[in-house]
Image: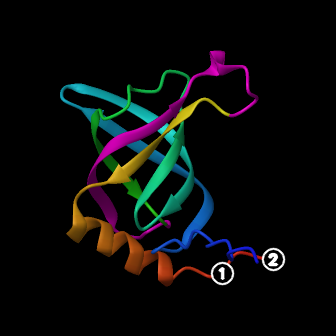
Amino acid sequence: MSEPVARSERRHRRLTVRIRTELSCGEARREAMATTLGGGGLFVETPEPWPRLTPAGVRFRLREGGGVHRVKGRVVFCHAASDGIGRKAGMGIEFTDAEAAARVAADLELLPAEPV
């Protein structure tokens, strides 16, 4: 008899988005488009992703007129355009500031559900 396969369950809601973000690492600053956002982190499209484990500051607004979220994080994976796999170039950033991440998660819960 085979064992049931455990499904990966996310702790936070995750949405497909198009949100302009400001990223920082030390003195370096750049703008990028977030395409996936959850209470635990986000994915940003950028032609030159930072290396894995790079600390990153992320700043964004979920909706017009809403408050600005400022969250500390770190790069946990990256896709270079040269990967040749057909994925968008960019990087996944995990939020490391638990309080700020909780505010993002709470704000996400107030957004309408995505159409199915």
Task: Name the quarter where the N terminus is drawn.
Answer: bottom right
Which is more toward the observer, 31 or 86? Answer: 86
Residue drawn at x 33%, y 47% is 58
**Label 2 Cα neighbours within 10 Å, binned few <14 / some 14-19 / many ≥20:** few
Q: Is residue 37 left or right of residue 51?
A: right
Which is more toward the observer, 61 or 7? Answer: 7
Q: Is residue 98 left or right of residue 34?
A: left
**Residue stretch in magenta:** 63-87
Q: Is residue 81 left or right of residue 65?
A: right
Three-letter residue code for mark 1: Ala
Where, by quadrant of the figure, is residue 68 drawn? bottom left
**Which x, y percent locates residue 13?**
53, 74
**Label 1 Cα neighbours within 10 Å, binned few <14 / some 14-19 / many ≥20:** few
Three-letter residue code for mark 2: Val
Residue drawn at x 37%, y 51% is 94
- Give how far apart the Cα atoms at labels 1 and 2 are: 9 Å
Residue 59 on the magenta segment: no
> Is residue 41 placed above or below 100 in the rendered structure?
above
> Is residue 109 placed above or below 35 in the rendered structure?
below
Residue drawn at x 69%, y 77% is 4
Name the residue tied to disc 2. Answer: 116
Name the residue tied to disc 1. Answer: 113
